[in-house]
Image (cartoon, rainbow, N blue to C red):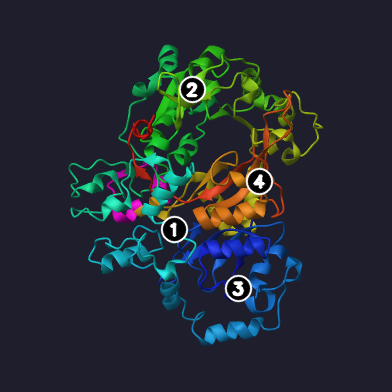
Amino acid sequence: MYTETLSPSFVGMTFPQASELCFTKLKLLLLAIEIKSDDGNDSKIAINPRGAKISANTQGFFIAQSADEVKRAWFYCKACHEDVKDETLIKKCKCKNFVGQMLMRSGLVLRTGSISQEVTTIPNSVPNIKTPHRVTLSVKANGGRPSDGNIAQSPSPEYGTYRSQLGRQESAQKAQSQGFPTLKRPTSRGSIVNSTHNSGGLQAGIADDQARDFDFEKTEMKYDSTGMFHWCPSKGLEECILDRNQAAMTVLNGHVVVCLFADPDSPLIGLRNLVMPLRASNFHYHELKHVVIVGSVDYIRREWKMLQNLPKISVLNGSPLSRADLRAVNVNLCDMCVILSAKVPSNDDPTLADKEAILASLNIKAMTFDDTIGVLSQHIPSIHSPLASPIVLQRRGSVYGSNVPMITELVNDSNVQFLDQDDDDDPDTELYLTQPFACGTAFAVSVLDSLMSTTYFNQNALTLIRSLITGGATPELELILAEGAGLRGGYSTLETISNRDRCRVGQISLYDGPLAQYGEGGKYGDLFVAALRHYGMLCIGLYRFRDTSSSVEASSKRYVVTNPPDDFTLLPTDQVFVLIQFDPGLEYLPNRGESMVREEPP
């Protein structure tokens, strides 16, 4: 990961335009830019920002092979390099200084405070688009109320052709008509169409309580004081403890199982840091995955002060090595099983430091399960059974434990050889070259060493990586957590709710949906451009099956391909990692799918 100042040729471009140019022309992956405040004293890193435009001297954050490659972003000159096909020929040109001087004379470089407002401010006709500090100014200029303009009907030319389709009204219509899985998910938020007709109080579609006058006594706090994470009133640990029978009756599905090895007096490992990213406010509440912690209640009680304000957490007082406990929490139906240990390793033999975690991992892989049917996941309006009831796709659980998605934390790198029985890696192989690490099933503490080295040479890299992993952080939130009081609830305001409008890492499938056409032998470069232009999604890599054959013996393991070349051939079974924009969505209706079925003629 590298940073570089974008050349003057990028000034005035929207972020999607700049990212597309970097990928197709410079063979670089632009993830984020640094956006400065009007006074120039404050700055923040915006990952795949919506509607932001590039101003002079903007820092870009790239994924590339070397620092020399990233220099192309600074050397690029539209006048000299527009027709260059070989990216290695993009070097410092003779007119570089001349262009810079012309920009300085025109005031684009020296007067960054004044030009940044012209370049990055989005007009009041575009409501609820997150811009750095500009959205506050535009709201105040309008008397404290949002504009009645409709983005779908009168898109501003300054907003760019790439984003003119992403008005919330058209976003909802496009999601329904094209069936795109990410944009069509229902939420508890009102759409922008209804909000413009709301004359009472604040704008609907921003928060559930804002469809009426803002009454602090009646308003329920749903987010923390910064608006970055979901929040709930404190719950006692006893309210969240499940016994084995209660867990089995809950019929957990699509959840996260945390297998925790700890003694009552083990040092605290900070479970809040694991759960908080799963409670980021750019998820809608119904999208939050239930977290079930399997371990010692005596230890969890010591951690509970930092977990009590995070919703959807349950605790099973048991052992991660107990198959009965694992079956009770439906480990075969979980979206991820995380295996952690808080025990202090013995100094006698470092190999034994990970014995519990490795045994738990191998124990789950050796389990077999019934062909369990999960919850209903998708309605198909056009298919009916003989009894005229709709046939639905149902999520089947893993029959074999080896197919359960799992990640195991290791203290000692060399112990990775014990995680995969079918792995032929040499015991002396570097961690990052082993199969468990490439498949994402093992994480070692030593990975943080390279992160520390990267931070030493590039202080902003840690901020970017932390934002990707933790779902976002603000100086105010850092101060609150540093004081040790934990998350505090806060009422929803325009300023805090605007923090929800930030992108997040997601996965999309090439098996179906509007991008499925690229799964049949398409090229990664075409997928990258289409996803960015039409959906505002920035592709960052692929998640591919290790064995692409259709034989019965084929493994279900996948590995990550970060930033493939543009001529990389895609497969229908590939999944794509994307930085996806926050989707305000449609108002949540529990029986939305059923009503669609009834409306269709038999």
Determine the CA span between mark 2 and mark 4. 40 Å
Marks 4 and 3: which is nearer the front? Answer: 3
Q: Can residue 341 be seen here?
A: no
Determine the CA span between mark 2 and mark 1. 36 Å
Displayed quadrant of residue 249: top left
Residue named by callout 4? 449
Identified at 64% across, 71% down, the residue is 74
Identified at 34% across, 32% down, the residue is 590
Residue 199, given in percent of the width and then of the height, sits at 19, 55
Marks 2 and 1: which is nearer the front? Answer: 1
Residue 559, given in percent of the width and then of the height, sits at 68, 38
Would residue 425 be found to the left or right of residue 301 on screen? Answer: right
Counting residues from the start of the chain, the first of labels 2 and 1 encountered is 1
Q: Can residue 335 be seen here?
A: yes
Residue named by callout 1? 165
Looking at the picture, does residue 365 appear above or below residue 4? above
Question: The disc labelled 4 sits on which kind of residue?
Answer: Asp
Residue 97 belongs to the span the image colors magenta:
no
Contact flag, marks 1 and 4 (Cβ < 8 Å): no
What is the crowding at mark 4: few (fewer than 14 residues within 10 Å), some, or many (at least 20)? few
Marks 3 and 2: which is nearer the front? Answer: 2
Residue named by callout 3? 7
Would residue 602 be found to the left or right of residue 334 on screen? Answer: left
What is the crowding at mark 1: few (fewer than 14 residues within 10 Å), some, or many (at least 20)? some
